Image: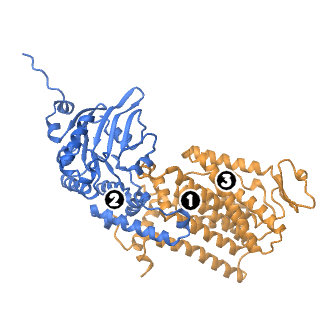
Amino acid sequence: MGIKALKPQTRSTIITYAIVLVAFVAVTLLDGMGLISNSLSGQLVPICAYVSLAVSLNLVVGVSGELSLGHAGFMSVGAFTGVVAAGCLTRMGIESELLLFVAAAAIGAVAAGIIGFLVGIPVMRLRGDYLAIVTLAFGEIIKNLLNNFYIGVDDAGLHFSMTDSSSLGMNQGMILVNGPKGAVGIDKISTFALGIVLVLITVAVVLNLMHSRDGRAIMAVRDNRIAAESVGINVTKYRLMAFTVASALAGAAGVLYAMNYSTITPSQFDFNQSILILVYVVLGGMGNISGSIISAAFLTVLPEVLRPINNYRMLIYAVVLILVMVVPNTKLYQRAAEALRSKLRREPKTPAAATEGGEGNE
Amino acid sequence: MSKFTDFAKQRRESTKMVPVPSVSIMPERDLGKAPALECLHLGIDFGGLKAVDDFNITVGRTEICGLIGPNGAGKTTVFNLLTKVYQPTRGTIMVDGHDTAGLDPARVNRLGVARTFQNIRLFNTLTVEENVAVGLHNQHHCGMATSILRLPHHWKSEKYYHERALELLDIFDMAGLADHEAGSLPYGAQRRLEIVRALATNPKLLLLDEPAAGMNPSETAELMENIVKIRDQFQIAIMLIEHDMNLVMNICEGICVLNFGKIIAKGTPEEIQQNDAVIEAYLGKQKEVEA
């Protein structure tokens, strides 16, 4: 039984996992042979973080069909919570880096999930442009809040202030979050292997959710809200579910991202960051998980690969972006893709699929 | 049997509402039970316009009831009121004896009202089977965590959805199309899929909005058979809006005629065909010939 005999759904799931695993093996082998440059190997963890972020945002934008512009906000909630949690745990004497990372990622995910849920309750009453604007505002609010957070830990426990670091009133403590200077003195415990595991978990959560009772309900709401209501689906519940799960996954990715640097600042998680993640999702295709993985990895690597031609690299980056958007809409590409698809497909075409190929790209 | 006749008579007298269930189709077990649908003085205003006014109807538990009327009479508005897409301005809707005041469309569905739409509303990017599985949403539960972790219960649920969906699709011989994208189906198949999806929610009352629209005579004939088959098999009430008089007159036990938002006649097909008000609404008034 070949791969063609499987259901399309199962086949694409297998392909998605295979892409991640093959990439992991290939990179590990190349790294072992010393074929990966320093600048690129420094990008491996951020790539994993961005892939996770793109996949989780795809759950909101592609699967649930809501435009969210505040994904970096949830990423920062996760990142800062994770850093604080890791700081506390280190202070409590936990040495194992693996345990630290897992705990920090879990706490970051839960915190971002809770914030996502709370933000989602009012936001999910809105639709379309309004939802986009409110999520955008949320991202900015979180950034500005974090700019005013001072968190430290000493033997007495956690200290928190919103004025400055000296008013924390610690004795012999360690400052974890220092307002606009961000989180400082982070243990760099993120590794590529941990990143790949997180990517796999994110992909598994999103795909398993998509191909289940709740996932079908989420997609039904996206496809036709009125019809979904008419078959007894609680629309708000499922929009909120997608939003919350995506926020939690973004939080975990934020922890991975933060633990790769010794310092992170709130201003790193701004509107541009949210848009960047959205670009990955749009380029990879709405609701297309493997597409998100490839586009996030590709677009994170591209500026690094182009570094030798430094003056032109952002120009080429922009040109590539435009080409990826334009080419799939050309007749030539569509004809080639159709030919390839009919070759791969075993069964005959669907009954009324004889719609003219012109406006195919939705 | 006499017990039922008394009941029906009593109902008819107490509420003065037709159509009432015809004796032959009322199963013994339904005797004395609440009707599938009961509307009292239902109405909605859009601005100053009374789109539907003083709409009274009782639909028996296994009755096929037709809702007809000229274009713009308010038939689809009635469906939207019954499913709470619109909140009624006045009046009461009782489904299976439960008041639906304040409920949203999803809750009304869980109470037992399922519908199809005049302009087809399928989940176009999902497959045919998935469309029906969404309809089965509230028939079988499986939590989010169970699904994400792929616990044994998830696989049991998926098996249930798969088997039940195919079973339901078989009513219209559509099991072979299960893996096709719903949006790619031909028009007639999309209409049938909508009915299957509505049936999947295990309704007590099925509302069909122009089920035969765009079908040719042989497809319509098949649809008529299927509607009756569904009623007999599932023992549910069916209310349908239809312009195809052949279909309405042949399968409906009771017909309700609507014009300008008001009921102008109720009765059996024979009665409706003789009704002057109905003929006037459809064909216009015959001019008085002046001597």
Numbered tag placed on residue A238 in the rendering: none
Q: Is residue A202 above or below residue B191?
A: below
Residue A73 as seen in the image, left or right of residue B12: right
Classify mark 3: helix, strand or loop.
helix
Residue A215 visible in the current orientation: yes
Say which residue label 3 marks.
A115
Mark 2 Cα-neighbour bin, 10 Å: few <14, some 14–19, many ≥20: many
Chain B's colour is blue
Numbered tag placed on residue B185 in the rendering: 2
What kind of residue is marked 3? Ile
Subunit that carries the residue with mark 1: A
| Image position, residue B44 (x, y; %) | 39, 33
Q: Nearer the viewer, mark 3 or mark 1?
A: 3
What kind of residue is marked 2? Leu
The numbered mark, 3 or 1, whose residue comes first in the sequence reads 1
Residue at the image point whose x is 64% and y is 60% from the top? A248
What kind of residue is marked 1? Leu
Say which residue label 1 marks.
A59
Whether label 2 touches label 1, CB < 8 Å = no
Q: Nearer the viewer, residue A179 or B48?
A: B48
Q: Nearer the viewer, mark 2 or mark 1?
A: 1
| Image position, residue B156 (x, y; %) | 45, 70
Q: Which chain is orange in the rendering?
A: A
